Image: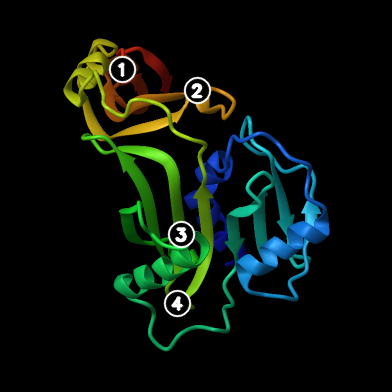
């Protein structure tokens, strides 16, 4: 059960674990005492004990450190530049179950309280995603994501925060935050969604179904040391007749200013 719960949480936030952090000039590394103080304040637990995880992987162009509690029940990633917690994974206490699980509205209220405590307010952020999903033996989890948008097409910026709630215990089991440097790119697309979809169609000789799409501002090739780009991210699904009708999925990333295909993930 413990393993299933942990895998469910990791599957929800693995992308954010790789994407979190700022791209400001790097300052000196925090020592364990200073890092522990920041994480204790984040958790409101003045006696929390932590140890460093020296070989943890982080995204390109960022300066983060990962810490874990001695019993492995909680993991934290700390942005050493901004001196804030960017990722937290906490195992809920199975013995602290509520008499009635939180509804989705109650979970959202709890998540909003946490966001306001950590960011000061939700001003400038919009609730972009909310869902309650059953993860079988790992139980039901509620996920909420707040994002910043810019321009008339509401391009999503890197500034965002995501929380996952365990409604059975009322525990915030995961928290992820991205803090971006100053955004200096035009948020208005020169290539609209329909044109981007036509670019995708030209790359495929078989019929496909578009499953989801978004317009966002992100770092080129997911490298924090590179410039921002405005991009269309389009996910498709298709049956490839050349492969005996096997269903394939692909993600196209297209530059929304010039129509260049930046990458294709299959």
How far apart are labels 1 and 4 at the CA level? 45 Å
**Residue 40 sits in which quadrant?**
bottom right
Q: Secondary structure at mark 2?
A: loop
How far apart are labels 1 and 2 at the CA level? 14 Å
Residue at 31% x, 29% y is 187
The 10 Å Cα crowd at callout 1, few under 14, some 14 to 19, many 20 or more, is some
How far apart are labels 3 and 4 at the CA level? 15 Å
The picture places residue 207, in percent across and down from the top left corner, at 20, 20
Who comes first in sequence, dot 1 or dot 2? 2
* Residue indicated by mark 1: 257
Q: Is residue 130 visible?
A: yes
* Residue indicated by mark 4: 168
Who comes first in sequence, dot 3 or dot 2? 3
The 10 Å Cα crowd at callout 2, few under 14, some 14 to 19, many 20 or more, is some
* Residue indicated by mark 2: 227
The picture places residue 135, in percent across and down from the top left corner, at 43, 61
The 10 Å Cα crowd at callout 4, few under 14, some 14 to 19, many 20 or more, is many
Tell me whether the residue at label 1 lies in contact with that at label 2, contact meaning CB atoms closer than 8 angstroms: no
* Residue indicated by mark 3: 163
């Amino acid at each position: 059960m413990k393993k299933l719960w942990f895998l469910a949480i990791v599957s929800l936030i693995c992308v954010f674990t790789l994407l979190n952090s700022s791209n400001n000039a790097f300052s000196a590394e925090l020592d364990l005492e200073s890092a522990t103080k920041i994480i204790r304040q984040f958790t409101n637990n003045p006696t929390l004990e932590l140890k460093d995880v020296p070989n943890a992987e982080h995204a390109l162009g960022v300066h983060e450190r990962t810490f874990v509690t001695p019993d492995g029940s909680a993991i934290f990633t700390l942005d050493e530049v901004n001196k804030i917690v960017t990722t937290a994974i906490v195992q809920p206490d199975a013995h602290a179950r509520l008499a009635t699980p939180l509804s989705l509205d109650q979970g959202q209220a709890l998540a909003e309280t946490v966001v306001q405590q950590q960011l000061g307010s939700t001003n400038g952020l919009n609730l972009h995603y909310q869902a309650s999903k059953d993860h079988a033996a790992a139980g039901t989890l509620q996920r909420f994501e707040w994002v910043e948008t810019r321009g008339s097409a509401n391009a999503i910026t890197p500034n965002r925060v995501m929380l996952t709630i365990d409604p059975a215990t009322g525990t915030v089991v995961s928290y992820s935050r991205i803090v971006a440097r100053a955004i200096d790119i035009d948020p208005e697309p020169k290539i609209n969604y329909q044109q981007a979809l036509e670019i995708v169609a030209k790359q495929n000789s078989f019929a496909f179904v578009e499953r989801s799409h978004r317009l966002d501002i992100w770092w080129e090739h997911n490298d924090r040391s590179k410039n921002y780009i405005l991009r269309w991210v389009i996910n498709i699904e298709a049956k490839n007749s050349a492969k005996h009708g096997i269903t394939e999925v692909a993600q196209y990333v297209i530059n929304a200013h010039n129509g260049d295909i930046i990458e294709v993930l299959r």
